[in-house]
Image (tube, helix red, strand yellow):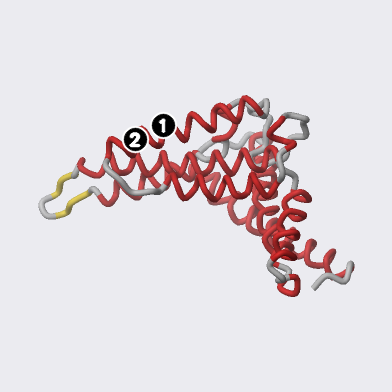
Amino acid sequence: MKEITPFSYRKSSSPLHRLPAGLKLAFLLLLSIMAFLPGPELRTFFFLVTLAFILVILSFVAGINPLALLRGSRPLLLIVLGIFLVQGVELSPLSFSASGIKEAIIFCVRIGIVFAAASLLFFTTSAGEIRKSLSRLESFLHLDRLKLSLHISLMLGFLPQFFRIWEDLNLAWKSRGGKNKPGRLVKLIPLLIEKMILKAAETADALEARGTK
């Protein structure tokens, strides 16, 4: 599982891989909306458990370890949890309100479900399949001139690129004896941003060379 890059396509012949990309995109959108539906606390809890169970079943159908769907989500979840914890601090008098802990946990579960669903989409759907599906929708809606399929597919394609570059930087950091400390982020994040900008420039040059505007 540790060798799986988050949001990277894994070639397979599973039933989930063979499903149309448009259907999987629609499922991701629907599941993301459902994960954030408001409601009573107890009903929300069972609803989120049901969504998580569905993702676990689908991951087994795709031949993927369910835990692999959450790989790369830890920094995001820690940031979200940290924001809620900071909001729980009361300065006058100095105290901590635990009333928001449940809300923070539920919100993190919502984020985790959406992240896992997106991972499952990218694990089972190639960038080319996503673009073809969006192109067909674009043609059906007579929006070909806007080239939304190209823009959206490029945007989605940068997600696996982000994690791939981040893992390469981490590997280089560890191979040089770097330790897992906060200072690592200070040094690696600027490099990550630089490499992402360079990757975007290379993509733009490639599209221009092909006559795509």
Looking at the image, the residue that sits furthest to the right is 210
Number of marks drawn: 2
Residue 69, how many percent across, how many down? 58, 34
User: How far, Cα to Cα, is label 2 from label 1?
Assistant: 6 Å
Q: Which mark is residue 45?
A: 2
Q: Position of 52 compared to 41: left or right?
A: right
* Residue 4, image quadrant: top right
Q: Work out whether residue 52 or residue 195 is closer to the camera in this orientation and state it.
A: 52
Q: Residue at x 71, y 73 (%)?
A: 146
**Secondary-structure class at tag 1:** helix
Mark 2–mark 1 contact, CB under 8 Å?
yes
* Residue 196, image quadrant: bottom right
Q: Which residue is mark 1?
A: 49
Looking at the image, the residue that sits furthest to the left is 93
Residue 142, how many percent across, how many down? 72, 71
Name above or below for residue 153 compared with residue 114: below
User: Split into 4 quadrants, where in the image is the C terminus?
Assistant: bottom right
User: Split into 4 quadrants, where in the image is the N terminus?
Assistant: top right
Residue 102, how many percent across, how many down? 28, 39
Residue 132, how many percent across, how many down? 77, 54
Q: Residue at x 34, y 35 (%)?
A: 45
* Mark 2 residue type: Phe
